[in-house]
Image: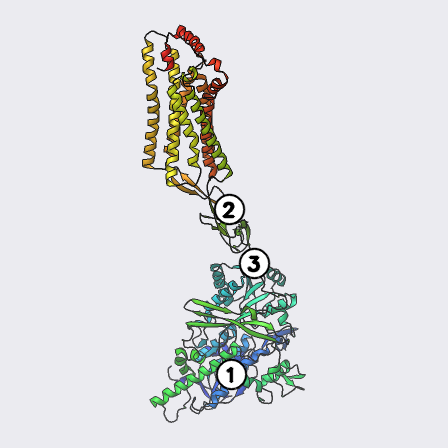
Amino acid sequence: MRETSWKDLRIDVSCGTFIPKRTLAREQSSTLSSAISASPGYHQDGDVIIGGLFSLKATLPDTRYMFGFQDTVYLSDFVFTALTKHYQHLLAMVFAVEQINKDVNLLFNLSLGFSIFNVDFTEMKAVASSMSLLSGKSPPVPNYNCRTEKKGELMAVVGGVSTLITTQSSRVLSLYNVPQISYGPFDLNLRDRAQLPSLYQFPRDSAALYQGIIRLLLHFGWVWVGLVVPDDIRGETFLRDMTQEMDNSGLCVAIAERIPEFHTEDIFDSYILIVKLASTSVSVVYGDTYSLLRFVLNIFLNNIYGHIYVTTSDWDITTSPFGPSQSYTYFGGGLSFSVHMDEIPGFKDFLRSVQPAKYPHDIFIQDVWSMIFECPHLTKDGTRKLKRCAQNGTLESQDLQVWDMNTSPQSHKVYAAVQAIAHALHEELSLRMEKESLEKGWSTTPHPWQLHPFLQKGQLERSAGKGNSVNETMSTTRLDIFNYQSLLNGTKAQVKVGEFVFKAHRGHLSLNDELIMWGERHNEIPSSHCTSSCPPGYKKNAIEGNPFCCFSCRPCPNGEIANQSDMDECIKCPEDHYSFEAEVQCLPKIPTFLSYEDTLGVVLVSVAISFSVLTALILGLFILYRHTPIVRANNTNLSYVLLVSLMLCFLCPLLFIGQPSPATCALRQVFFAVVFSVAVSAILAKTFIVVVAFKATKPGKASQMRLVSRGSNAIVVLGSLIQGCICMVWLGTSPPFPDVDSQSEFGHLVLLCNEGSPAAFYCVLGYLGFLALLSLMIAFVARRLPDTFNEAKMITFSMLVFCSVWVCFLPTYLSTKGRAMVAVESFAILASSAGLLGCIFLPKCYVLLLRSDSNSRKKLHEQVSSIRQRNECSSDIIDGK
């Protein structure tokens, strides 16, 4: 800083001292001395002075009423409420100064004094008191120093407790480079070094506070939460950042309420506040005691009970500014975050010893004492004077709503600020002594601006017990969590119930739920939801146009579960598991298949074996009556082949029943396809021979018929061979294999055979259909031929039955899943085989067993003669020989 020249000096007639001119300060303050006087202060002499700006009351500024045209009546400040607990801030400064003066080595035999003013929460008082600190006189004399011979020079100022008070006082103090340390809430707007170059703050890690609140809300499951902030820049910043943090954590803002300051015009609609607070049970309140006075007043006036407030230590919810002892009724159960600070050694003992008689020069103790102890008093010059009061009373005996023996965070900051100033002085004096730069005739007292380098290096943080620089975020932040409780003896207390430690962008919440009390209205943890919680088995369904915390509940679909409450999506069970009835857990599915023990399996096996035995009996009957005309008609060998193939067809379902294996899966469709191809090919050969035999009318055709008869076996072989080739290609490219169906039957894993290539399977069925359709068409042509030994009509009917069964089989098979699909195919095999057996062979068995007279050679010769007359065909051809 440049040296002061004689041209820059002025003589103060009233003070008799020379001080540098400050043109800007004079312009800003010229009107103050005539209209506003600083409040009487509490002073203690010393070689150096520390100023203190404290706020002990909430008042309205001076009010002027005009009567007529010239008369003006000045009314004193109207006190709305006295904040008696704020007197501890002042005592913390007094205690710190006493401790420093006891240490003769700290300031090198310099004594430390103080000059304390109560500025309430009035900006003009803050400006006037700052001017009084600079001039050393109250009312202030702007731009003049009334202290004699540098005695008691102002070194620094501690204050204030709110942003507005701090800002206005710093604008004055910064003109003279006097360091100022604010003990109020940290405000980013006060970090402007261009506007407020001499101001320092105790830093706060906002990220730690945000995360601590979020973790607390999540811990108790409070997802529908209100936000209440002062209507200022600091409140808007918190509202913006906290809303973003809540959105990122899945929490919803139920209300966002901005509270005007107490001294502003009352345009606040308290009814709307009541309605909004009724929509939620929990609100996060950010602000200080003064900025939230209007909010507290509305709570008291409208009797809003049972609400849980989550806040910080800047707002003392235990204070009862508008009621004698009802703060717990309205704010009981509240949770408060406070930066962890160690107890000041000896401070509690100091508080216990505080009495009016011990500090007769303290003009504030009289006023505070009369309010705390409710003593009768007289008022003189705006200050209460005790009349009858217990002078030997102790603060320790007072209730929490008016006094707290525990050191408040603000008091701790005041103590740390004074210590920081003292240590900065110590370092400056030590530096002077080391350089031996003192000259004779110069004062050893440093100038206020010489403390800035030491405060900027982190002296403030070291005094507060931290190791980081001023105004920088601390690497590790520890927040204590307090709960406002009513103890067993009826006293109220702030009880520590947990802490939140934040380090390297990670936080750990430790909370003892058993210690927490939720006030007079709750016996258990209150809930705060927009919508009731969705129970297990249900998922949240968003409602269009509403916040995501407002939702409906929808049951989980089959195969999915919700094993917790309020799940956004249901969890799909694994393929081998299924969801229980309540959709809350997945159970393993039971493997199942069409077994021989099942009722359906037993029926199919019984039917298959019964028909197979019946076919074997018919084959035996035909062999027994092999020389009879009805057996020899239409080629005996083809009848034997057809019966044997039908007997095997009836046994095919045995391969479909039982647990699938690679062997059974590969063989069952191939075996079914081949034996059915043999059976249908035999019927085709029979039909073809009948048509050719009865259509041969010209001479010389007999020899051709013999060739056709011999080729009947070729038809059977060729028809079966083609089907066999199709099956070989199927097995060689994509054979059937064992598979699991987890969807067809609830709670079961169906073991079945996957056909491998659906195209090959349908080719097999298509080829069988082609053979059957060809046989049907040929038999239909021969249906009107003589029918004594003619099978054309029976083949026609049997093919109709066969085709009908398999045509019905396809849609049924495609629409069926699981074990039923196996049963459908087995039933189709049995039904079609039974149709062939019944339509072709049962009539012949009837003739063999019950109409033997029709099965004679005489009858045969009569038929042959008729045939010869019409077709000129020999009996050898009829016999197939």
| Image mark for residue 64 | none
Look at label 3 and name its amino acid.
His
Q: Is residue 352 above or below residue 684?
A: below
User: SS of the residue at dot 2?
Assistant: loop
Q: In the image, which disc is placed on residue 529?
A: 3
Tell me which label, 3 or 2, sits earlier in the chain.
Answer: 3
Badge 3 local density, few (<14 within 10 Å), some, or many (20+)?
A: many
Where disc 3 sits, the SS reads loop
Picture quadrant of residue 40: bottom right
Name the spot of residue 45 as percent of width and height, x first. 51, 89
The residue identified by callout 2 is: 558
Nearer to the camera, 128 or 362: 362
Distance from disc 3 to disc 1, alpha carbons, whole Å, reads 46 Å
Q: Residue furthest top?
A: 869
**Relative height, residue 242 to residue 55 (above, below):** above
Circle 2: residue type: Asn
**Numbered disc total:** 3
Whichever of callouts 2 and 1 sits on the residue coming sooner in the sequence is: 1
The answer to which of 636 and 6 lies nearer the viewer is 636
- Residue for point 49% across, 36% down: 602
Question: Which residue corresponds to the image point at 47% horizontal and 20% vertical from the top-left?
Answer: 845
Where residue 872 sits in the image (x, y, percent)?
Answer: 37, 7
> Does the rendering let one see residue 22?
no
Percent coordinates x, y for residue 587 in the rendering = 49, 50
* Residue reaching furthest to the front: 624
For the residues bearing labels 2 and 1, Cβ distance under 8 angstroms? no
Quick one: label 3 or label 1, which is nearer the N terminus? 1
The residue indicated by pointer 1 is 93
